[in-house]
Image: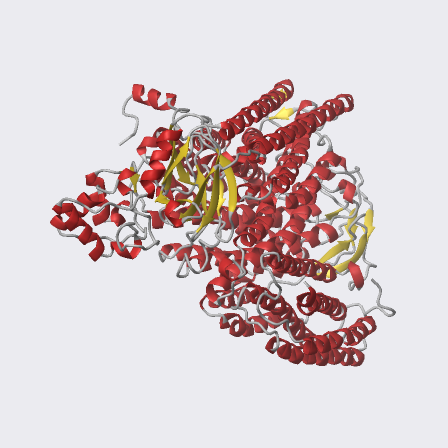
Amino acid sequence: MAISEPIVLPHATDEVRLARTWAQPRGFWGWFMNVHHTAIGVRFMVTSFIFFLLGGVLAAMIRLQLSRPENHAIGPDLYNQIFTIHGSTMIFLFAVPMMFQGFGVYVVPLICGTRNIAFPRLNAFSYYIYVVGGLLLWVGLFLKTGADAGWFAYTPLSGPQFTPGKRSDFWAQMITFTEVSALGVAICLATTILRQRAPGMTLNRMPIILWEKLVLSFMVIFAMPAVMVVSSMLLMDRTINTQFFNPANGGDVLLYQHLFWFFGHPEVYIIFLPGAAIVSTLVPVFARRHIFGHLAIVTSVVATGFLGFGVWVHHMFATGIPQMSASFFTAATLMIVIPTAVQFYCWIATIWNGRLQMKLPMLWVFGFFFVFLIGGLSGVMLASVPVDWQVHDTFFVVAHFHYVLIGGALFPMFAGLYYWIPKITGRMMSDLLGKVHFWLFFIGFNMTFFTMHFLGLRGMPRRVYTYPPEMHWGGLNMLASVGALFMAAGLIVFIVNFFQSKATGTLAGPNPWAAGSLDWATSSPPPEYNFAELLTVNGREPLWDNAPNQPIVSGVRDDIPEVLITNSLDSEPQHKDEMPGASIWPFLTSITVSIAFIWSIFSPWGIAYGAIPVVITLIGWLWPRGHSPAPRQPALEGRWSK
Amino acid sequence: MEQVRERPVLDVSGLPSVAFGKSNTTWLANVLYMMIEGTMFALLFASYFYLRTRTDSWPPVQDPPLLTYGVINGIVFLLSLIPARYAQKVAPTGDRGRIRLALTGLALFAIVNMVLRGFELANLNCRWYDNAYGSIMWSLIGLHTGHLITEFIETVSILGIAFTPKMEGTRLADVAINSDYWYFVVGSAVLMDFIIYGTTRFL
Amino acid sequence: MIAASSPMHAAAVLASFFQGEHNSLHPAGPFSSNIEWLYWVIFWIVFVAFVLTILAFARASAKTYSRAEEMLPIMKDEEGDRKTKWAVGTAITVTVLTLFAVLFMSVITGKKVEGMSSSNPVTIQITGHQWWWEVIYPNPQADQTVITANEIHIPVGKPVVILTSSADVIHSFWAPSVHGKRDLIPGYSSAFWIQVDQPGTYPGRCAEFCGLQHAHMGFSIIAEDEATFEAWEQQQLKPAPDPTDAEAQHGREVFLTHTCVMCHTIRGTDAGSRVGPDLTHLASRNMIAAETLPNTTGALAGWIVDPQRIKPGNKMTPNPLAPDDLNALVTYLRTLQ
């Protein structure tokens, strides 16, 4: 049965009424009141893409300065700020907000088959708080007092004694903002995936991308607190004289590294797993079959989530830890290769026994296969302690992590953008421009970053603003810098393609890729109520597997914004929830929280005084409103039951 | 004549629009929030024990915190479980009078807890800037105090709603979930007390 | 302008990929050799893995590629999937076994690289500073303790113990041809062995970002035969001789009456500050400013007058001296052999 066939009877819902019920306000203030997930998801994607471009500009400046030995384009102070903010922007302001928050918030409720994300106001708040955090970091740079101790800001360099002024404070508080934002979205997504899936979408039938976003939400829940704790400790050392990282006073420099990397390593899996999930979503569509090894892949995603927390010390192999401990972490690091290898083999198998249609998104998936594979394999080399002793903190490591991050996140991101932008805007993107973008970017990327493996082996350390000509690193550096130009060109082509196709691209229709998931069961772009009819589900790819007379859901009200809540395992309907409508309180609360957080960089009383407006806006947010004319059902009698 | 096609329908119109217990999505959000804050406590505990390994004696130079207020507050925390549990039991009934009673009781206990917490802070026998020991002690008790204050404000806000006709439907479930968060505050208090008052005496 | 000024030059630069004594793949001693061996073994393993995986993708794509414009109908290949299960299972098994092999070899190499024993090895205490290396050869007797900076001499062919510490932030001691790197962490001290089997000069750099002049924090390890090494040690133990000619005497006076004494020691004079490098045998070193400049009269003069121009942000203030004073000072410093 094709969903796009006109359904005559019975109508479970009236689309006109649905549109009115779920309409988000328009106009200037209306923008700040919008709580629909598609709007917020697009905002995460657009904002994070802008930060990506800004981070890219910083990268171009790095490559300019390093293109020749003893170059004087950029001095050490500015250079240190540039590479710090480049890394911090790419990780905190681009990768997670795009891969987890942007794609997650937009796509997950649609794939679940529900009308909005759980806790829509928390979702909106998470967006605003992220924007403020990003601005905070960049304002520091523009005021020439930007963070300059590297994106992981090791103590004591980042501490009060060796980085006076506000620099590291901006960094540490940016962490707080972005971490609160990620945690908010984690709560929203975990609840949506566990409780708002379409009836029939049992765990066994749940698409891989929902598994991944669920695992990711829990990874965020357990990892982000570590960076919150460590950045707060750093901030307190810098502002109120705590002694956490001062070895002269009982503190410990390595405590910082342990806490940071306990977050930092899961963080990079938080960036990679969404990329792998996009690949697991696209490969079946473009190989025209169900994925091979669904269970194996789900297990691998879950295993990666767990194992990701067990490898952090591999960032500290050069600190002089005992060989025995180090070997344990080598073993754990090698072990985590296995679930990723399993996914690779399943992807190959799917294509092998399928029918490959190399549409534009799939081209980027192949780019991922090539680039991420190299990055993962150089990671195997880094896992070995003696080898790591040579290549740690050199351009070899810079090459490795760009291969895994750009390969593992950026290539899938572009695959996902070319795949889902038709759903978001309603128009297809240009195939030709997309291919030009791909090849420019692929060639430029390899030119820049493959070269760095050699530079690292030949002794070039990271984070140096210049290098002497006698080291003979100039030629390779120049090559790496030229590659950056190709990448920039590719990005310009993408931006042109985006705007052009948004205006005049071919209309996409509901399902241009003949895909199987529920996000393609509605128009492009989706209406604000997401689906005309709420569907039930019969298989892992509903649009491929549903029976010809697959039931639709009726009985969910269309005069109030109501969603169906199902249970976690079987997705059986449990009850109905009324979603909050549009509200200005998330925005206002983000203002008060921002004031409190920023004030606390300048004075410890900031938290205390700043908390008062926060409480006021939270009460405004949570105070119940009068609602629909229909009477609410009476409370249940009887014992409290869990 | 139009072709009319029949199709099967899954009718959920009879389902309730209020849920208590683990079906409630706010309950789930609260559980996830407690996991986040629990992880923060766990990491502070881990840092505490880690810092212990970096010095010869513990506390390094100071006296351990005074036991009195910590023990009394611990007892008050455990007693506060009574109004919290009562609130959970009466919430599904919708009886606003009983709910107000339970929440008022809980709020009063929280006030006593906060007052005693003030005395605890004054008798920690260390300052956060003394050394890493002082810093971690204040961080532990500071994080918990933040939760205590937040939970107090939340309880009072819900109590406020209980004076209005809006205390019905899902708001009743919120009363019960608030008690869950209070259990977290009490549980983390007990653990933290053990660390602050107990381990400083035998580690 | 572009570093490679002609295709021939470019080719020469590219051909010099793996040359030099600052190169992990150009080991000069047993430790770096063991690591290099392990590197190549793992490299070839991952290279084979890469080739096999790419071939598998290529074969899968070529086998099933369709040029169709519209999206084809959904298909199923249960027979193919059943056969593929065996292939995937095999691939996973081979992967696991290979990873075990890598683990095993890493641990073995780690043990080889760690284990060494020697009676009475030369012991060198390296303390990292922003942005220079304090080098001390400890000895229970103060007058038998060599104190120098940035340039480390060791006897060739013999194991040497390096002790690490840091005076400020985290640094990392790394001479790639000699050994892997070891972080210098304030509040921690660690020890590791090095050994160089061929005489020569082996440059090293700081490998942990440590602030503004991290890029200009180099050192060198000079491995020489036993006799030369002992002669060097004896020379380093001597205090600075009194200058004999008038200009050098004037230069010493300049040194002792300007801000130099706030940071630098010259044994044999009253200058005893340990904030900056010990200058007692400055003229015996090949380079100055932590291997940033050659140790020549001109470079030295330029460095003294304006260190901020060469290493902006470093801790040495500019010293605008009158030309006579400057020349005298440099003359004096060049007597400190």
* Residue drawn at 71 percent across, 81 percent down: B108
**Would you place residue A142 above or below residue A55 in this image?**
below
Q: Provide residue C57's location: percent of width, then percent of height.
A: 61, 23
Report whether residue A188 is seen.
yes
* A57 relative position to B134: left or right: left
Residue at the image position 66 percent from the left and 52 percent from the top: A189
Give the answer, above or below, for where A504 lies relative to B124. Answer: above
Quarter of image, res A512: top right
Q: Position of residue C263 (x, y in %)?
A: 30, 54
In the rendered image, residue A508, in percent from the top left (x then y), is placed at: 58, 38
The answer to whether residue A465 is seen in the rendering is no
Q: Nearer the viewer, residue C107 or C52?
A: C107
Along the viewing direction, whichever of C21 and C139 lies nearer the viewer: C139
Q: Is residue A508 left or right of residue A447?
A: right
| Residue placed most toward the observer, C204 or C233 | C233
From the viewer's side, name the closer residue of A438 and B54: B54
Quadrant containing the N terminus of chain C in the rendered view: top left
Which quadrant of the figure has residue A404? top right
